[in-house]
Image (cartoon, helix red, strand yellow):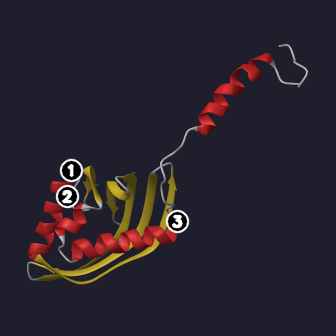
Amino acid sequence: MNLDPTGSTDELRHRRPLARAASRRKLPDVPSMDDFAAAAWVQAYDAAWLGQDWQRLARYLAADVSFVPNDSGSALIGRKATIAHLRAFLARSEVHEYNATDVLARAARGVGFISYRWQLDWTDTGRRRVADGRDLLSLRFIDGGWRMIWRLQLRP
């Protein structure tokens, strides 16, 4: 390789204009997703499904969301299937207490990941139950808001 007077190689000098062009591309304005913002998102999402506000809940879900409930080995695909699952759960259950804690988040370039612990105390068909686990979420910034694109529930 030949060095030019600036000390760079011909090869690097050739690549430099492409790198500058890539760095000038404008990324869409995406709000940050730190742990605090993630906790607020989770709280609002939980308030929607616990309050059975299905229209509001739909705004937190991407149309093609994939949801793997902890009581099933198969994924629910789509906003309608996910809402139908939560609606069926609340139709037969009474939630006494629900908590989401230990929220952690990472986000970059319009994709976010949230992890949190949950505890649920409920009565299902006359039987009192208590469970806990961890949810793993992936979100995408779509149409001005963070939308869930994937959710996996894990039990300890």
- Direction from residue 95 to residue 140 in the image, left or right: right
For disc 2, the marked residue is 82
Q: Which mark is nearer the camera, 3 or 2?
A: 3
For disc 1, the marked residue is 78
Q: Secondary structure at mark 2?
A: helix
- How far apart are the two marked residues, 3 and 2, measured between alpha carbons? 26 Å
Q: Please state which amino acid type lies under the numbered disc 1.
A: Gly
Judged from this view, the residue extending furthest toward the top is: 2
Does the rendering let one see residue 71? yes
Q: Please state which amino acid type lies under the numbered disc 2.
A: Thr
Q: Is residue 46 above or below residue 150?
A: below
Residue 67, position in %: x, y? Answer: 26, 55
- Within-10-Å neighbours for mark 3: few <14, some 14–19, many 20+: some
- For the point 28% across and 57% down, the residue is 61
- Direction from residue 54 to residue 112 in the image, left or right: right
- Quarter-wise, where is residue 15 in the image? top right
Q: What label does residue 117 carry, if any?
A: none
Q: Please name whichever residue, 6 or 127, is drawn nearer the observer in this view of the structure.
A: 6
Residue 149, position in %: x, y? Answer: 32, 52
Task: Locate the N terminus and report the quarter of the image it occupies.
Answer: top right
Does the rendering let one see residue 156? no
- For the point 17% across and 67% down, the residue is 54
Contact between marks 3 and 2 (CB within 8 A): the answer is no
Q: Is residue 69 above or below residue 37?
A: above
- Quarter-wise, where is residue 92 in the image? bottom left
Judged from this view, the residue extending furthest toward the right is: 5
Task: Locate the C terminus and report the quarter of the image it occupies.
Answer: bottom left
Q: Secondary structure at mark 3?
A: loop
Residue 74, position in %: x, y? Answer: 22, 50
Q: What label does residue 34 carry, if any?
A: 3
